[in-house]
Amino acid sequence: MKKMLLVLPLLLCSRIALAQIPAIPDSAQTLVDSVMSQVIEWRRDFHQHPELGNREFRSAGIIAEHLEALGMEVQTGVAHTGVVGILRGGQPGPVVALRADMDGLPVEERADVPFASRVRTEYNGQDVGVMHACGHDNHMAILMGAASVLAGMKDELSGTVMFIFQPAEEGAPEGEEGGAELMLKEGLFDTIKPDAVFGLHVWPIPAGQIAVREGGTMASSDSFTIRVNGRQTHGAAPWAGIDPIVVASQIVLGLQTIPSRQLDSTLTPSIVTVGAINGGLRSNIIPDSVEMIGTLRTFDAETRRQIHERVERTATQIAASAGATVDVDISLGYPVTFNDPALTRQMAPTLQRVAGERFVEASLITGAEDFSYYANEVPGVFFFLGIGADDPALVHPNHSPYFYADERALPVGVTAMTALALDFMKNGML
């Protein structure tokens, strides 16, 4: 396993030299310092007023008003509630996109903060609490802060910055499209196609830490349904039918041999999980059919393809051995979030200048992210920003009702997004 990016062993040996280089120009740092109180205010306001995917009307309105006040070209209503701001610098140059997601989750907040959410709404027919349990309130505030800084340097910029505020990263409501995929489908990159795209995600690692890795970073996320078709019979005479419950049990075990015995585990990890099995009504009746559902995760496009092929083959052949049949349906979810290796190596020094000693290699994350759609269109880098508090009792995983973000991370996030834009516009794609 590589210790870090190809350039990082050298960077880690030269921390002192890099520490002597300012993360951003003094003029930009002055602007970052001046906007931080507003960034904190935005973050707390968004946190107190979360909105679910494709329903981020209030958040979008605040963002659009801010970008318009900065003099940007602003488009609203993209993929339902998305907002896009275009900042054209004083000189021609590369186009860089910076992305933040906007939606909250159907989670009732239990974190003890004065700006805790008390919002409730309807989700899938149920009354639910709503919370920014994945930190998207931080993402919006950070990118709004970076927009203020870069707009304040407009005449000095050599290039164009696209600010993408995206709805429904956590998934669109049932029966709707949404998120990054829909923004692209509606032509996000058709008029102005960026040369690179950058995004961040707050994560429960030490506050202010920046973590990044090249290649597969967050997993693809696909779901599957396998219906095992047998033949119903009396439970006392199993030989008179075909037992789909026994076949389903064998399929569950057989599926586990895909990551453990059929794929090269030295290349990339993968996961096959059966999350539910349903079939049968009585103890003395062997049913006609059993249905199982599950998820597939991996970090490589080819491995993803192979898993799909092997899930269908394994289920089909195990069923055939017992005289049963199967219907296998695999639904594609988010692709692998893949950090372009060349771009990641190029921008790693920028992130290290921002984080200093807090710059580390990111672990593989088996969760999924729809930033992956942007990075499939243009070179992209997605990194993690630590928001973990010093008190371990306050550190909770994303999606927890106790999720807590240490606001010491906010200036690091604003500086990082600003620095990535400035450095990329200065050099382009090397």
Image (cartoon, grey):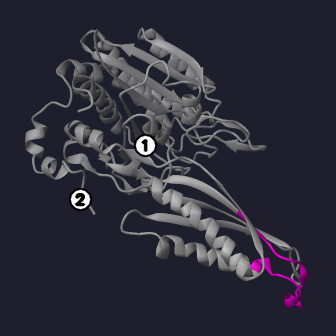
> Residue 181: within the magenta?
no
Q: Of label 2 and label 1, which has the lower sequence position?
A: 2
The alpha-carbon separation of the residues under discs 2 and 1 comes to 28 Å
From what the image shows, is residue 395 above or below residue 69? below
From what the image shows, is residue 386 above or below residue 282? above
> Which residue shows up at 28% across the image and 9% down it?
90
Quadrant of the rendering where the N terminus is positioned: bottom left
> Which residue shows up at 34% across the image and 14% down it?
151
Residue, disc 2? 3
In-image side of 205 versus 335 (left or right): left
Q: Amino acid at mark 2?
A: Lys
Number of numbered discs visible in the structure rendering: 2
What percent of the width, then of the height, locates residue 227?
A: 75, 66
From what the image shows, is residue 72 above or below residue 322? above
Residue, disc 1? 405
> Most extreme residue toward the right, as rendered?
234
What percent of the width, then of the height, locates residue 128?
A: 70, 44
What percent of the width, then of the height, locates residue 119?
A: 65, 36
Element class at badge 1: loop
Nearest the camera: 58 or 100?
100
Nearest the camera: 187 or 349?
187
